[in-house]
Amino acid sequence: MKFSLLFPNDSERRFAVLTDEAVNDLSLEFILDALTEERAERPHLLSIMKRIPAEPETIRYRRDIFDDFLRFPKLREAMSDLVKRLSDLRDLERFQKDADASALWSLINRLREIDDYMSCINMIKDTLTGLDISSSGMRELRDYVTEIPRESGFDELKADIDELMTKARRLKSITIGVNLDKLLRPEAAGVVALNDEKFSDAGLMGRFSSFVDSKNEINHGLDKGESGRFSPENPPTTGFLMGATTFNTAINGSHIETSTVTGKDPLSNALRKTVTDIMRRTVKDIKSTIKKYVDFSGYSLINLMPEILFYIRWAELTEKILKTGMPMCKPEITSYESRDCSFKGVYNLKLAINKVKGESINIIDNDFEFSDERRIYILTGPNRGGKTIFTQAIGLAMLLAQWGVYVPAGEAAISPCDNIFTHFPADENDTVDLGRLGEESQRLSKIFETATRHSLLLLNESLATTSVAEGVFIAKDVVRVMRYLGTRAIFNTHMHELAASVRDINDEVEGDSRAESLITGVHNGERSFKVFIAPPQGVSYAADIAKKYGVTFEQMKNTVDSNKTND
């Protein structure tokens, strides 16, 4: 079973992928900067964030898991430790393919890694058992890691590793025998014994002195204190038993060939090859011992690393935002078919991130909804009045809800969209070949090749680079096709004539997504950043601004008259 914390078991793992334009327009790179300082984590997080699930069951599954991560700092701490340890063990998957490994110390490190991995499994099991987790996903993970030892020979593997490690740690020295030819050249070398004690200098020199001073000079036969087994044809490689001084097992020696009496050092070559053979055979033996375990299901926990990291980082950021006093809520997920959406006190996540960074900022929230009464909004307002910030805020709120994390709002209930398409001004360098209007028109056309009635479209100052007459002409057709398609959309623009024509568009085109005029507020010449449903108020905005800065006719006339009087 391939377990996942992003998709329920036995569910279809379907998702839409954000376009590169949407990733840029919704500032996902900026959000990644707030989520992590680790460059290595960014690709994993972005990969998850670009993929949008639309099934309510999947979103609720994620949302409840995230709720557990947010409620229990201890869970995040334990999972952070798990991710760190698993990242160090990712090479375990290469173990099966590493058939040529021959270094004993390399194998010992692998055994330590496997032992650490089993410790990871026990750690996550103990953590989840000790918490009052409520999500089905985390309860299933708890059951999953509990079953791993039972289904995978876990206890046997641990016992085998403990035994092998104990033996390996006891190996302190190797006794090697060398055969000589008639010219006293080394012709073969082999292991006589593996010892659990190191040779002492005094013992070695003493034996040498005894040999030099001995009247017999050369022993008859073999030293009775050592094993006589030197180079068997097929030596066993299992069942090592450490005695007080030796193993009762020997490894094949190496045959040495030299072409001249004064050739290269044949003894060194022989010894090097002999020791290498020992290690290779030892590795092969221990590999065969653990091969039956290497596919056990516990290794799939490594695949959960990006998913766990996703929940940890979003829970950490959410906690920081909550500490600033800004609300973050657990969204209600409604049916996919309804295409409704409502927010109480929604705001732009990017502003909250800036507040977390220490900026002194007054964040304005808004109430907003998509419903049968209105699903397409033509948003107008003054420059720097918050149109782009609000448009982006709705896109990010929908994204966060469908990722399964908390939403920047006091309350939220959403019917999931199948994808989010954005149409923000392009970089000047991208419009050289087609011209700005051609480039914008082409991108709009591509959106409608893919968008459905379940999509969310966010247009920011689209078609603003051409003349007003041309822009309004094309923009009206864009809104008409939105209504015909039945999609949800926000189209923020300076084209007040477009906003004023929503009633005509609703009458001209049949569809179940009605268009509505939405404006950003100005009160006493000050931008309030509040949005509300009303006809476009371009002239009244200008009048408020003019009055604030003293450039109405009456204000300027009074100034002129005052100057004349002073003269």
Image: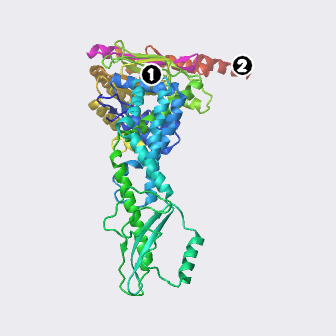
Q: Amino acid at mark 1?
A: Ser
Q: Closer to the N terminus: mark 2 or mark 1?
A: 1
Residue 290 coordinates in the image, percent (x, y): 37, 49
Q: CA distance from mark 2 to mark 1?
A: 79 Å
Element class at badge 2:
helix
Q: Indicate whether 513 appears above or below 440.
A: above
Q: Is residue 507 magenta?
A: yes
Q: Nearer the viewer, residue 133 or 427?
A: 133
Quarter of the image where the N terminus is located: top left
Q: Indicate whether 183 appears above or below 175.
A: below
Q: Nearer the viewer, residue 112 or 192?
A: 192
Q: Amino acid at mark 2?
A: Thr
What residue span does the magenta drawing correspond to?
A: 503-531
Residue 125 coordinates in the image, percent (x, y): 45, 32
**Marks 2,1: beta carbons within 8 A:** no
Q: Nearer the viewer, residue 482 or 350?
A: 350
Q: Quadrant of the rendered structure where residue 266 is?
A: bottom left
Q: Indicate whether 240 appears above or below 509.
A: below
Residue 514 coordinates in the image, percent (x, y): 33, 15
Name the residue: 39% across, 62% down.
Answer: 249
Residue matched to label 2: 565
Q: Indicate whether 357 appears above or below 264.
A: above
Residue matched to label 1: 134
Left or right: residue 162 versus residue 556 is: left
Q: Quadrant of the rendered structure where residue 499 is?
A: top left
Name the residue: 47% across, 29% down.
Answer: 128
Name the residue: 73% across, 21% down.
Answer: 566
